[in-house]
Amino acid sequence: MTNPDAVRPGFICPLCGRENHCAVGAGEDPSGCWCMTAKFPPGLLELVPAPARRRSCICRQCLEAYRRFGPAFLGITRESEETEGGGYGRE
């Protein structure tokens, strides 16, 4: 997992804590960011802690994991990080 102290809050996914590679947060043209055309299910957005809402982008892996597993993906993320050293998070 990315060291949160080494990355500004807008650059980490509020669900998994890994870098989200946000074009907006990096000061780049937002129209080139993958998230501008992605559809985020309301249930996924509801999982973002209130202080991080509209301040930090969800990463692509969390979006894909939610689509595949639903809200249970958060448990899958934590378990796979502990047992396999990977899991759903940022690239």
Image (cartoon, rainbow, N blue to C red):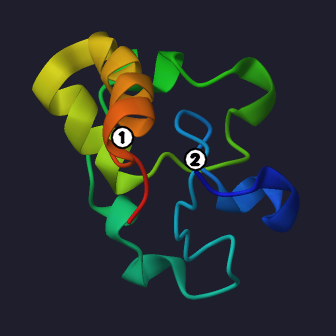
Residue at image position (43%, 58%) is 90
In the rendered image, which residue does mark 1 sit on?
Answer: 62
Regarding mark 2 in the picture, which secondary structure is present there? loop
| Residue 65, percent from left and from top | 24, 35
**Which image quadrant for residue 26?**
bottom right
Work out whether 34 lies above or below 13.
below
Of residues 1 and 57, the one nearer the viewer is 1
Regarding mark 1 in the picture, which secondary structure is present there? helix
Q: CA distance from mark 2 to mark 1?
A: 8 Å
* 8 relative position to 26: left or right: right
At label 1, which amino acid type do we have? Cys
Quarter of the image for the C terminus: give it.
bottom left
State whether residue 39 appears in this view: yes
- Pointer 2 with pointer 1, Cβ within 8 A: yes
Work out whether 59 lies above or below 16.
below
- In this view, the residue farthest toward the right is 5
- In this view, the residue farthest toward the bottom is 28
| Residue 8, percent from left and from top | 82, 62
| Residue 6, percent from left and from top | 83, 66
Q: Which mark is residue 78?
A: none
- In this view, the residue farthest toward the front is 83
Work out whether 23 lies above or below 88.
below
**Which image quadrant for residue 74?**
top left
Residue at image position (64%, 57%) is 2
Closer to the chain start, of discs 2 and 1, is 2
**Label 2 Cα crowd, 10 Å radius (few <14 / some 14-19 / many 20+):** many
Residue at image position (26%, 28%) is 66
In the rendered image, which residue does mark 2 sit on?
Answer: 13
* 46 relative position to 26: left or right: left
Work out whether 15 lies above or below 24.
above
**Label 1 Cα crowd, 10 Å radius (few <14 / some 14-19 / many 20+):** many
